[in-house]
Image (cartoon, grey):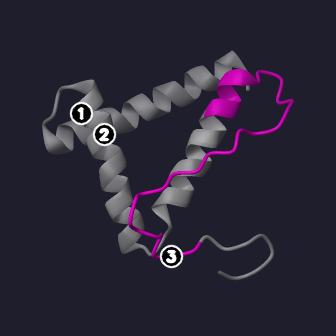
Amino acid sequence: MSKALIKQRVRSASTALNAFRHQVGEDDERTLMLDLIADLGHLAARRRLDFLQIAAQAVSAWAYERKSADGAGPSPQVTITVEGRRPKYAWPKKGGAA
């Protein structure tokens, strides 16, 4: 991924984080990001989406984009588990239903 595209995505993420900051009134960047990610998990559950799968895919994409400016090489495999809990909703397999 090009540096210009990463810069554009950072601006977009910053805009979203600032909108969330105004909603919740939090100023600490780390706490703000943590709360936004947790709230996205609640939203995913409400919409019957597998948040852990989405988060794992997002972290994989982020790691790939950081290491591979030319788009070459495999994507890192990321697994997120929560002890004692299985995901309630299964991510659909490629070409089929869940």
Q: Nearer the viewer, residue 86 or 55?
A: 86
Q: Secondary structure at mark 1?
A: helix
Q: Are marks 2 and 1 in contact (CB under 8 Å)?
A: yes
Q: Position of residue 25 (x, y in %)?
A: 13, 37
Quadrant housing the C terminus:
bottom right
Quadrant housing the N terminus:
top right
Q: Which corner quadrant of the image does residue 20 belong to?
A: top left
User: In whole angstroms, how far apart are the C-alphas of marks 1 and 3?
Assistant: 27 Å
Q: Secondary structure at mark 2?
A: helix
Q: Are marks 1 and 3 in contact (CB under 8 Å)?
A: no
- Horizontally, residue 97 falls left or right of residue 27, namely right
The answer to whether 17 is drawn above or below residue 67 in the figure is below
Q: Nearer the viewer, residue 73 or 69?
A: 73
Dot 3 crowding, Cα within 10 Å, few <14, some 14–19, many 20+: some
User: In whole angstroms, how far apart are the C-alphas of marks 2 and 1?
Assistant: 5 Å
Q: Which residue is mark 1?
A: 31
Callout 1, which amino acid? Thr
Q: Which mark is residue 83?
A: none
The stretch of residues the image draws in magenta is 63-90
Q: Position of residue 74 (x, y in %)?
A: 82, 38
Q: Which residue is mark 3?
A: 89
Q: Which corner quadrant of the image does residue 24 belong to?
A: top left
- 76 within the magenta span: yes
Q: Residue at x 32, y 36 (%)?
A: 33
Q: Main secondary structure of the magenta part?
A: loop
Q: Which badge, 1 or 3, is on the more N-terminal residue?
A: 1
